[in-house]
Amino acid sequence: MMSQGQGLRLLSYQSRPNVSHPFLLIAHTLQPSRSWNHFSFKTPGMPKPFHLQLPLPLPSHNSHQTQTGTQDDGIPIDDVKVIAKFKTRYNYIRVLQVSRRADHPFAGSRLLLLDSPGNIHSISFLFKSLTNTYFDVFATLPPILPPGAVGILGFGAGSTARLMLELYPDLIIHGWELDPSVVAVGREYFGLEKLEKQYPNRLFISIGNGLKASIRNGFAGILVDLFSKGSLIPELQEPSTWHKLRKSLRKGGRIMVNVGGSCVEAEDEGRNGKMVMEETLKAMHRVFGDKLFVLNLGNRKDDDSSLALTGELAVPDRDAWKKALPRSLKGYVDMWAPYQG
């Protein structure tokens, strides 16, 4: 749908500090939205909206200034190309290419969308590894883990895996993805096949239910990014799921979770993003107690987006954690706060 028409332009792009996702591309006949997180472009004759949720870029941790200038004008529709689009048993898959000419933080990126709300599950750039999104927060986990492999549940096309393999030379990753077509798209359009050949003894991908993932001697860490139809899967609101995942960890292991938030739009209107996030955190708290921390990437009540982390996190632990990270990722460490319920 985005490839139709000429001269369409996305309007009203503004980014806020420390917000990972999403903003929306909406094709309709209404007036442009005044909301900070909406792209709106008028397309007469298209009564139904097309939503594209993108992870908003995070600013440099050396600056807390909101991005301004020409980025506020959005991406011209001519700078976005749909290079693959099809449906599978599990997803509505679209691969988008953003032109390098676009005056936007996502210029030159390739995006993987799943489900009709248009949730981004992977992003890659040709000339850089960092994405300035929550995928980068995921990549901070290994320095605070015991020795051992990391599991990625909801592998997508491998955005997090690529970054972690480059940052940590000894790290072994086991990824689980339910939809084989997502992995196939990753190999064809996101360089996943090359990544597998480059790290044949460090990257292992399984097709199947990530909640059944296990390896011998347990995971040192688990990253959970499990969404379906634009919402965290219902199993994550059940304490029994977190009991099971905790048992799959080795001693000292941790879990980091993308728990979404109010800015996440589901196909089912009853699956309110903020409500689902809160229910997920409550379920985790029943299992992990005071060893649960939350990093909120939003700065308003109506646009929150959060990640959760399990385990101890004392001040000395934070200092050591920051020393083990590259400068571009250090700022995330101090953003973690104890879960307040």
Image: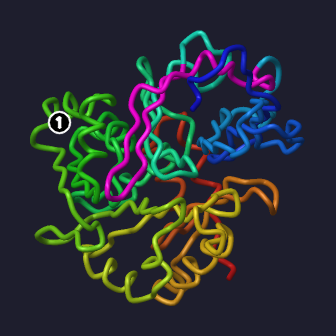
Q: Secondary structure at mark 1?
A: helix
User: Does the magenta portion include 72?
Assistant: yes
Position of residue 241 in the picture relative to residue 106 (left or right): left
Residue 71 x/y as whole percent? 75, 22
Left or right: where 334 falls relative to 217: right
Q: Residue furthest front?
A: 45
> In the image, 290: left or right of 8?
left
Q: Quadrant of residue 277?
A: bottom right
The residue carrying pointer 1 sits among few (fewer than 14), some (14 to 19) or many (20 or more) residues within 10 Å by Cα, namely some
178 to 34, vertically: above or below: below
Question: Where is residue 284 shown, x and y percent of the image?
Answer: 50, 81
Q: Return the residue nearer the eye: 183 or 339.
A: 183
The residue positioned 63% from the left and 58% from the top of the image is 264
Quadrant position of residue 10:
top right
- Taking the spot 42% from the left edge, 63% from the top edge, the residue there is 226
Q: What residue sits 72% from the left and 20% below the top?
A: 8
Give the camera-side residue of 322 and 255: 255
In the displayed structure, 327 sits above or below 215; it is above
Q: How is the image coloured?
A: rainbow
Q: Quadrant of the N terminus?
A: top right
> Residue 281: where, in percent of width, then height?
57, 77
| Left or right: 216 in relation to 168 | left
Q: Name the residue located 32 percent from the left edge and 43 percent from the top edge.
A: 161
Q: Nearer the viewer, residue 235 or 339?
A: 235
Quarter of the image for the C terminus: give it: bottom right
Q: Which residues are magenta?
A: 71-98
Q: Which residue lies under the disc numbered 1? A: 196
In the displayed structure, 54 sits above or below 292; it is above
Question: In the orientation shown, which residue stands out farthest toward the top?
Answer: 101
Q: Amino acid at mark 1?
A: Glu
- Magenta stretch encompasses residue 165: no
Q: Position of residue 214 (x, y in %)?
A: 19, 70
